[in-house]
């Protein structure tokens, strides 16, 4: 039971960090756990999704304070990534958050959403749709569902 909690906590941490500052692949961790057939797929997807969405909320908060953090070494997006994401965001609006799951552009989009003062509720809803859909796709590929 305690080891199960550790597995879920580890997946949560990987998914959280993968959405923030450090490059990580939460999909690989989820896939490995799904392939083990030792844990509830629904629980794994829920834990990974919650962790990843909360990590994106950290990016949104960083965006809110972008002027203070933009030039820090640990900041999750380069100036070029932020400029590209801002261009997408200005062109397509909040719907770009449905791409928050995507490598390279996803994290900067969540930072830009904060910088451009996207309301937290609409941010969380759209990011959750994107992140959950991605993890469901991983589940479908792994299980052949």
Image (cartoon, rainbow, N blue to C red):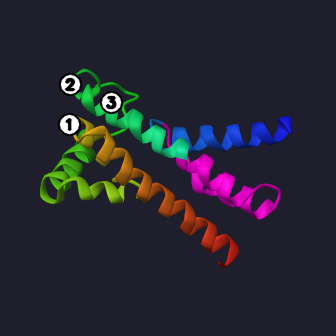
Question: Residue 97 placed where, x, y %?
Answer: 31, 54
Nearer to the camera, 121 or 87: 121
Task: State left or right for residue 96 relative to residue 142.
Answer: left
Comes first in the chain, label 3 or label 1: 3
Say which residue label 1 marks.
117
Q: Give the CA separation, mark 2 to mark 3.
A: 9 Å
Is the Cβ of the residue at disc 3 closer than 8 Å to that at disc 1? no
Q: Residue 6: say if magenta.
A: no
Circle 2 Cα neighbour tier, 10 Å, few/some/many (<14 / 14–19 / ≥20): few
Circle 1 Cα neighbour tier, 10 Å, few/some/many (<14 / 14–19 / ≥20): some
Q: Could you tell me which residue is drawn at 62 percent across and 55 percent down?
A: 45
Question: Residue 38 placed where, x, y %?
Answer: 83, 57
The magenta region covers: 22-49
Which quadrant, please, contains the N terminus? top right
- Which type of secondary structure does the marked residue at label 1 adopt? loop
User: Of tags 2 and 3, which is closer to the observer?
Assistant: 3
Q: Give the CA separation, mark 1 to mark 2.
A: 13 Å
Say which residue label 3 marks.
62
Q: Could you tell me which residue is drawn at 74 percent across and 56 percent down?
A: 33
Which label was assigned to residue 91?
none
Q: Specify the farthest residue to the front.
A: 121
Q: Residue 39: say if magenta.
A: yes
Q: Is residue 66 above or below residue 38?
A: above
Circle 3 Cα neighbour tier, 10 Å, few/some/many (<14 / 14–19 / ≥20): many
Say which residue label 2 marks.
67
Q: Could you tell me which residue is drawn at 19 percent across and 46 percent down?
A: 83
Question: Residue 138 placed where, x, y %?
Answer: 59, 66
Comes first in the chain, label 1 or label 2: 2
- Which type of secondary structure does the marked residue at label 2 adopt? helix
Question: Residue 137 placed where, x, y %?
Answer: 55, 68
């Amino acid at each position: 039971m305690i080891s199960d909690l550790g597995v879920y906590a580890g997946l949560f941490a990987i998914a959280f960090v993968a959405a923030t500052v450090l490059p990580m692949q939460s999909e690989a961790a989820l896939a490995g756990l799904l392939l083990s057939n030792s844990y509830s797929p629904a629980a794994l997807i829920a834990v990974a999704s919650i962790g990843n969405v909360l990590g994106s909320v950290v990016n949104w908060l960083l965006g809110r304070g972008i002027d203070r953090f933009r030039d820090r070494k640990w900041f999750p997006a380069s100036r070029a990534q932020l400029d590209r994401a801002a261009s997408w965001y200005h062109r397509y609006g909040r719907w770009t958050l449905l791409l928050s799951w995507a490598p390279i552009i996803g994290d900067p989009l969540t930072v830009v959403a904060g910088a451009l003062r996207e309301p937290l509720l609409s941010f969380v809803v759209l990011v959750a749709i994107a992140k959950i859909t991605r993890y469901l796709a991983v589940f479908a590929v792994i299980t052949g569902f």
